[in-house]
Amino acid sequence: NFMLTQPHSVSESPGKTVTISCTRSSGSIADNYVQWFQQRPGSAPTTVIYEDNQRPSGVPDRFSGSIDRSSNSASLTISGLKTEDEADYYCQSYDSITVVFGGGTKLTVL
Amino acid sequence: QVTLKESGPALVKPTQTLTLTCTFSGFSLSTSGMRVNWIRQPPGKALEWLARIDWDDETSYSTSLKTRLTISKDTSKNQVVLTMTNMDPVDTATYYCARETIFGVSEPFDIWGQGTMVTVSS
């Protein structure tokens, strides 16, 4: 089994760009697709990125995803930050037949 | 329209068995590529995947919890049931069910239920 490690929190100002990392502890980050979920308080998670860098319908192109084999990590980048982007963000991948979630990152837009 | 809704007891006592039901509509769990997952989230903590059942009855469980979990489906009722034995206060969490589609052209975890809060206390 592997773990996905995320920073506990990040903060940035409106209009700026923020990147949240998700580092895989063993095996290659490229072995399995990475998804990113946004969760606002009191709500269920929703997907903002799937298959490393794909955006679901309705997710603005301010959200982008990538993987970096050299650091064995995935990244979620949000540009043109808006106050509505303030939420918890979780990365997720697969370990063979099981599902692994990262520990989550609280994004504060101030 | 695809929807999922979790139901079950809000309060269980330590050592008891928890039974949660996910009732869904808008799709069939007998359709190839369909899965229903259970995920939980303790208050203020991260998401934790628990179990999954597939359209072909294949099941998968969290390595750390597999001795306590059983997932099953009733296709005719459009329901997936999760049981967790020997409940402990650390199992206090919001429990979500979520649809996963593996042959789709969009995000795998596309629809989540609203979640149901379960408190374990004597």
Image (cartoon, coloured by chain):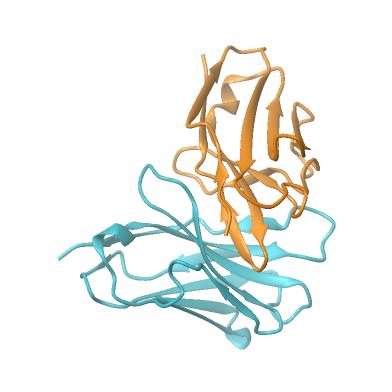
Chain colours: A orange, B cyan
Residue A39: x %, y % from top left: 54, 41
Residue B11, quarter of the rendered image = bottom left
Compared with A62, A27 (above or below) is: below
- Foreground residue among A37 and A19: A19
Instruction: Specify whether A35 is left or right of A105.
Output: right
Q: Is residue A6 left or right of residue A81?
A: left
Residue most extreme to the right = B105
Residue B3, compared with residue B56, is above or below; it is above
Residue B74, percent from left and from top = 57, 86
- x and y percentages locating residue A21 in the rendered image: 63, 33
Camera-nearest residue between A31 and B92: A31
Q: Quadrant of residue A53?
A: top right
Picture layout, residue B20 above or below residue A95: below
In the picture as drawn, the residue positioned furthest to the left comes out as B122
Q: Residue at 75%, 26% (x, y): give it.
A: A62
Q: How many marks?
A: 0
Query: Between B120 and A28, which is closer to the camera in this rendering?
Result: A28
* Residue at 62% in and 38% down: A22
In the rendered view of the protein, which quadrant contains the N terminus of chain A? bottom right
Image-based side of B4 in relation to B81, left or right: right
The residue at the point 14 percent across, 66 percent down is: B122
Residue A45 point in image, percent of width and height: 57, 47
